[in-house]
Image (cartoon, coloured by chain):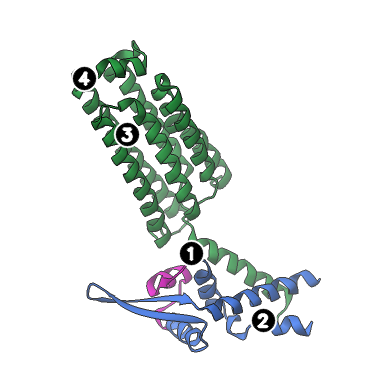
Chain colours: A blue, B green
Amino acid sequence: MKDIIAGLDKNFENRVRLGIMSALMVNESLDFNTLKELLGVTDGNLASHLKALEKHLLVSVSKQFVGRKPNTTYSATQKGKEAFTRHLAALEKLLGKE
Amino acid sequence: MKNEQTSLEDIKAIRQMMEESSKFLSLSGLSGVAAGLFALLGAAVAHFFILDQGGNLYNEFMISLKGANTSFVRIGLFIDALAVLILAVTSAWYLSWRHARKNGNRFWTHTARKMAWNMFFVLAIGGMFSFILAWQENIRLVASTMLIFYGMALLMTSRYTQRDIKYLGYTEIGLGLLAGIFLNYGLLFWSLGFGVFHIIYGVAMYFKYER
């Protein structure tokens, strides 16, 4: 039981962060507005969760200009993908126990 | 600590997000039906008005035209095909948009763009090649070419929408290959692929996902 709990990542306990990582697992990269649309959260809320994921090196950020508009895209890092896979496996195991 | 309920909800949320963020699920089955009906209408116009009321076998008719003045047939078929394409795409667009609105989903999402772009890319190549065939006075292979390219476009697109669409893709490719062998029945295979099977598939999808 202890091993399983250890597999769960604190970073993914929050629904918004879980959503961000799920979307980034199946898309190479997504921009801020697309993520906002998908998750249905406010700018500030999304930005703070992305910051946190970025700080833990689970998500990488790249900024480019599309014409004159800055466009920020996010993608999951290798570390992020591994952590998410572990988290998902732990969740599934937790369910399979009973 | 995590309990079972929240773990289950988490997994559900993950699945839903993965699907929503990578697939365009607003494609309505009814758009297949509409496209099929327009295709059958277009095929009827081609058969009765452009190709001499079907009095001639398709392939022999095409061969007999070779070298003679083929511009009526070529321009007629082109306008006919263009009209079918515009009507089919417009109705598919409208019906899917309506379907998305009914379910409270956004329509023009990034997955919709991805899907539309993939579809357009393969179809544009197919369209150009059909043009080249017509230009080389090889109209008889156009029906086969259109079916094969459309089938491949569907296979490409199936990654971004309901997976079932790939079976329609295989069907179109199969019919396209047959149309290449039995040249006399080119228009018939075309009507089957773009008309009849669109309708069958559309109805099946409608009952599977929209009822």
Looking at marks 3 and 4 on the same chain, the residue that comes earlier in the sequence is marked by 4
| Amino acid at circle 1 | Ser
Which chain is home to disc 2? A
Look at the numbered discs 4 and 1 and tell me whether their residues touch, using CB distance below 8 Å: no
> What is the total number of numbered labels drawn onto the structure image?
4
For residue B21, the mark is 1
Q: In which image quadrant can residue A73 be found?
A: bottom left
Give the secondary structure at mark 4. loop
Q: Which residues are magenta?
A: A27-44
Same chain for labels 2 and 3? Say yes or no. no
Please, which residue is most extreme toward the top here?
B55
* Camera-side residue of B171 and B109: B171
Look at the numbered discs 4 and 2 and tell me whether their residues touch, using CB distance below 8 Å: no
- Of circles 3 and 4, which is in front? 4
Give the secondary structure at mark 2. loop
Q: In which image quadrant can residue A47 be found?
A: bottom left
The answer for how far apart the CA atoms under marks 2 and 3 are is 54 Å
Which residue is denoted by mark 4 in the rendering? B67
Which residue is denoted by mark 2 in the rendering? A8
| Amino acid at circle 4 | Gly
Which chain is home to disc 1? B
The answer for how far apart the CA atoms under marks 4 and 2 are is 74 Å
Left or right placement of residue B49 versus residue A45 in this view: left
Give the secondary structure at mark 1. helix
| Amino acid at circle 2 | Leu
Which residue is denoted by mark 3 in the rendering? B84
The answer for how far apart the CA atoms under marks 3 and 4 are is 28 Å
